[in-house]
Structures are given as C-alpha cells and as structure tokens.
Image: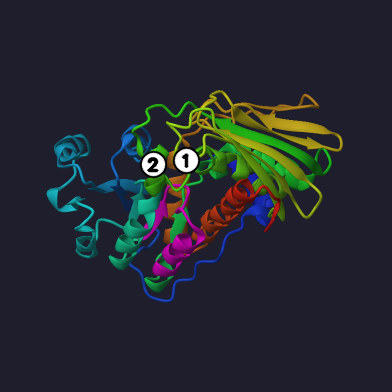
Amino acid sequence: MHELSRRHFMKGAAAATFAAPFISTAATREKAGPGKKLGVALCGLGRLSTDQIAPALQKTQHCRLAGIVTGSSGKVDAWRNKYNLPARSVYTYDTMHRMADNDDIDIVYVVTPNALHLEHTVAAAKAGKHVFCEKPLEISVERCQQMIDACKAADRMLGTAYRCRFEPHHLECIRIAREQELGPVRIIEAGFGIDVGAADQWRVKRALSGGGALMDVGIYALQATRYLTGEEPVLVSATETKTDPVKFAEVDETVSWTAQFPGGATAYCSASFKVGGIKNFRANCDRGWFELDPAYYYGGIKGARSDGKPLSFPQVDMFAAELDDFARCVLEKRPTIVSGEEGLQDVKIMSAIYESIRTGRAVKI
C-alpha cells in the first residue's frame, strides 16, 4: 500500500473500519518473520481468479499461490504448469476437507458464485484454513452469519474482498471526509453500472447470484457511502427499472436508492447491469466537493477536489494490496478492517433496499 495513504488511513479512518476483533484462542502455526509468506489456495478458477487474483499473488510480499480448488478438471494442468503447483495442492469442491493435511495452505480465497460462498467457507474453515471471500459475502444475512460462526468455531479469520479499502485514492477520500477538510459530508452521489453481457451467466441466475446489479456492482457504491460517512444508514428507499424482462427475469437490472445517515448525510446511488460507464462517487461538503471517477475499476483510478488540490497517487494492484493486508492480519493476529461482519452489514443493507423495492416503502435499518 502507498505509505502516505496508509498513514492517512490509520490517522483518520478508524471510525469507519466497522471491523469486529479477531482474537486467537489457540496456538497457530503462523509466525511473522523475514520472508514469511502464507500459502493461498484459490477456490474457483473463473476469469477473476485467472486474470486478476493469480497474477496479483505473484506480486505479494506476505502470501503466495499455494493451491487451487476447481470443479473443472480441464483447467488443472494449465494451472499446475503455469504456477508450479504440486498435485497434492489441487482439490475439487468435494475434497476440500483434505486441506487439513496440507500445511502449505494457510488461506482459502473463495471466488465462486455468491450462493456457494457459505458451502466453501465452511469447508475451508473446518479444514483449519483462514478464509478470504469475494463480495458480496453471501446472498442473505443468515448465510453470512453462518459463515462468520463457522470461522469463529474453527478459530479462523474471515475477510471480505473489498479491494477499494486498500486503494490509495479511496484512503485519501476517507481521510478528507473524516478530517472534514472541506467541511462535513452532506450529499454523496455514487453509482456503478456495467453491461453485464451474456444472458446465460450465473450473475443473472438468482439461485447463484442472490440478486443482480445491486449485489454485483451496486455494493461498491454502497460501501463508498459507508466508509465516507463513517456511519451506517438508518433509512433506505429504492426503485428498480427493468427494460429487458427476459434477460433479467430473475434479477434486478437497474436499481436506484437513497440512504439517510444519522449524522445528516444523504446518499443518492445507482447500480445497473444495462448501462455501462457509471463508475464514480462525489462527496459534496459544506465548503466544496471531492470525487473519484473512475472509482471502482481494477486500475486507472482518478480523483479531483473542488479546491484544486491534488488527489492523485500511484496506481496499485488492489488484489495484491488486499491479500497482503489480510496475510499481515493473520500473521500478526490482529483484526481485519474487511471482516465477515463488515460483509454481513452490506448484505443487511442490500436486503433492506430489496425490501423497499418490493413494498414501495422506505425501510428503516
């Protein structure tokens, strides 16, 4: 992580970490030391793992790619050859319990469809592994809680893959908001929209995704409103627009919502699987504004402030940054700011947004 941003984050954003403490109650084999790297097994070898996470693990300082879990036997040879993985570190979803005998693997990064996160997290935790899980944590509050409980029962740490929480521009925005450089944050405008693509993918199947645009990309805007205000919304009101009822028969196509925060801030947000190019947030304050546009892409993050001061930092690999931070948390036995409880909170709020859509009423949280 960019050192300036880390310093700013530690100084000003503690109130927005929303992290529950992790306290180990049993001896663990992880010990920090020179050159120590924890082994990470990727559970799910789709495009995100292939194009982003596995390459990022080649850049990390505190962890390394040590295993894979896949239901596609045709992928195994290519992954083993490319990353020099031993046969004993290759698993199927049905053999994850065997990880208990593999000391090379310390962390399982779950990168499967949303509704499979619970199953794979429980399997990893029972095998004695820490779990880092893609967002959203799961598709319901109850299933998120089961993941949290399983990891606590196994005395393992659970983290949610909120990569923007480790990106320098986002960290600087948290600092600006927390220190009220431009005055208190009053109105936040945030949105993320993409053309989701083919109609046969899991993201538009409710049984696997749990929801559409809100669950997949809207969660970025939701997260931004929470870490910019440092508060939890107390009231949400939402509507859905659907222009392709065939493709999006099972999930939401475009969602707009407003959220009120106890300190007086209001957020106006949107998420879409139909309209691409929505990718930013702007925080409007008493004495000006600051923004990121684009805010959520894997790279190319850009910022601006109304007072003309720079909001620019070197680009980082966010996947490497989040994985290194989680590995340090494991090694140092300290809480992660992206805990399972943090992931559950977003699912709780998204559930309230969906309730507002169904009922046509504002929902208190």
Instruction: Identify which residue is drawn at 39% across, 52% down.
Output: 115
Relative to 103, 153 lies left or right: right
The local secondary structure at tag 2 comes to loop
Decide which of 215, 224 is in the foreground and name it: 215
Q: Which residues are magenta?
A: 130-150
**Mark 2 and mark 1 in contact (Cβ < 8 Å)?**
yes
Q: Looking at this view, name the residue that lies furthest to the bottom.
A: 25
Q: Is residue 245 visible?
A: yes
Relative to 172, 264 lies left or right: right
Q: Is residue 142 magenta?
A: yes
Neighbour class for label 2 at 10 Å: few (<14), some, many (≥20)?
some
Residue 347: where, in percent of width, then height?
54, 53
Q: Amino acid at mark 2?
A: Lys
- Of the two numbered discs 1 and 2 on the same chain, state the one appearing first in sequence: 2
Mark identifier at residue 251: 1
Decide which of 26, 52 is in the foreground and name it: 52
Q: Is residue 101 magenta?
A: no
The local secondary structure at tag 1 comes to loop
Residue 33: where, in percent of width, then height?
38, 57
Q: Looking at this view, name the residue that lies furthest to the right.
A: 287
Mark identifier at residue 333: none
Instruction: Identify which residue is drawn at 44% across, 71% down.
Output: 24
Instruction: Identify which residue is drawn at 34% across, 46% down.
Output: 112
How much space separates mark 1 and mark 2, taking CA atoms? 7 Å
Residue placed under numbered mark 2 in the picture: 205
Q: Is residue 332 visible?
A: no
Q: Amino acid at mark 1?
A: Val
Neighbour class for label 1 at 10 Å: few (<14), some, many (≥20)?
many
